[in-house]
Amino acid sequence: MIKKIIFQFLFFSFLLLETVFAAESGGMPQLNPEFWVSQIFWLSLTFGILYLVLSKIILPKISANLESRKTQISDNIEAADKQREESEAKLKEYEKIISKSKSEAKNIFNQVRENALKDINLKKEVLDKQINEEIKKAEDEINQLRKNAPAKINKIAIETASELTKKLIGAEINNSSISAIVDDLSKRNGDKYYDN
Amino acid sequence: MAANPMTQFEVYRIGPEIKIGAFDISFTNASLFMIVSTFAILIIFNLGSKKNSLLPNKLQLLAELSYTFVSKMMSDTAGSKARPYFAFIFSLFMFVLFCNMFGMIPYTFTVTSHIIVTFMLASFIFIGVTIIGFIKHGFGYLKLFVPSGVPAILLPLIVVIEIISYLSRPISLSVRLFANMMAGHTMMKVFGGFVISLGIVGGWLPLSFSVALTGLEILVAFLQAYVFAILTCIYLNDALNLHH
């Protein structure tokens, strides 16, 4: 189809050129003023129409298209920036929450630990006190026993001595004289017997 | 085939003769390609601006890249004050570019290879820029012809040179485009003629030249449109920001 049109166009041009060739008079056709007015007229007409249509209809449209694309792109960039900022803020918030909960957990842990330590210490103290008391009581008892021991031993010694003498010699000996001897002995050798 | 390489620049009437008063404004092949270029631009940019998707399709990308290209070129050369003239610069660049590019298709007509067309565009720019300059700066715009830091003895000479260079702007602007287009197309035609005349034996060398020239001419077509637009921006900059 297009080939046919081109061929026809070429053929048509050949015909026209032949007619021109017949009328050709030599020299530069540009300087032949025969069609100057016609050319000026058609130039003004076509260029005028071109200028009017371009300036009134087409160029404003292209300009608006470019402008709208520019604003659309810049809007999109702005929106993307905004969203990025938002997400950054959210991330920060999230991190804040995490660090806060972390510190809270740490606090709770520390508190619990402290409480436990305190409890343990308290209990330990009570126990220590009890133990000390027990020890003291036992020591007191021991001391009491120790304090009373010489008197008892002396008494046993006196009784044993009186019993012995009674059995050996069959004579009653006054307890008081024996106790005097025992006392005297214990006073002299007390250190040897009781390791005080 | 036409052997004369200049026949490709012939303007001929298509359809009946149209006359307004004494003026012949018949529809010609030049008019046809002006209309073709205009409609091509309008269709491409209309399709390219129809839908606004975040990920542009090819046509939208083309339209937006052209828009930012011309916009950057203008703000680089003429600053932000030239913003109201953006549509004009854009139309100018696209019109010249499309006319040049359509001229690259074999058997088409190159609108910009005619001095009258480029001169009309250039003189319109020249007059417009001059009016803008006088509106913005009043008679202070004449300071454009008096560069600062010039010794007083040289000043009259410099002013004369500046005025001549200012007045020759439309001529240089139009002749640059016209001559480039005409020379390129003439050369391609000449090499094409060599291919035919040297035949199958010797035609390969001019053919390869022709191929290389086609690439060069496409580059020139773009470059001349760019130069035309950027020089317009520079003239506009002179009018808007008086730097001298």
Image: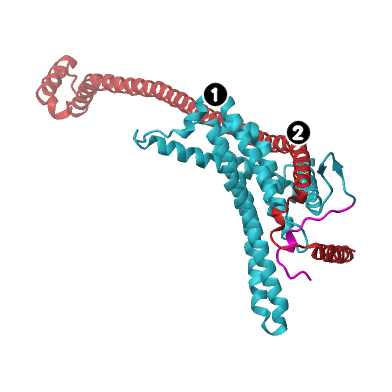
Chain colours: A red, B cyan
Question: Which is nearer the eye, A181 or A174?
Answer: A181
**Which residue corresponds to mark 2?**
A56
Q: CA distance from mark 1 to mark 2?
A: 30 Å
Residue in view at x 17 percent, y 28 percent: A195
Q: Is residue A37 left or right of residue A107?
A: right
Q: Inspect the image, locate mark 1, and give the three-letter code of the amino acid beneath it.
A: Gly
- Left or right: A50 as drawn, with respect to B177: right
Q: Is residue B211 above or below residue B108?
A: below
Residue B163 picture location, percent across and down: 50, 37
- Prevailing SS of the magenta stretch: loop
Q: Quadrant of the C terminus of chain B?
A: top left
Which of discs 1 and 2 lies nearer the camera? The answer is: 1
Is A64 drawn above or below residue A147 in the view shown?
Answer: below
Query: Contact, CB < 8 Å: mark 1 with mark 2?
Result: no
Residue at 87% across, 63% down: A12
Q: Residue at x 48, y 33 (%)?
A: B144
As rendered, which of B112 and A29 lies closer to the eye? A29
Q: Which residue is mark 1?
A: B138
x, y percent for residue B79: 55, 35
One can see residue B244 in this view? no
Which of the two residues, B46 or B146, is positioned nearer the viewer here? B146
Q: Relative to B20, is A86 on the left or the right?
A: left
Q: Is residue A172 left or right of residue B126?
A: left
Q: Is residue B25 magenta?
A: no
Q: Which residues fall within the magenta stretch?
A: B1-15
Secondary structure of residue under mark 2? helix
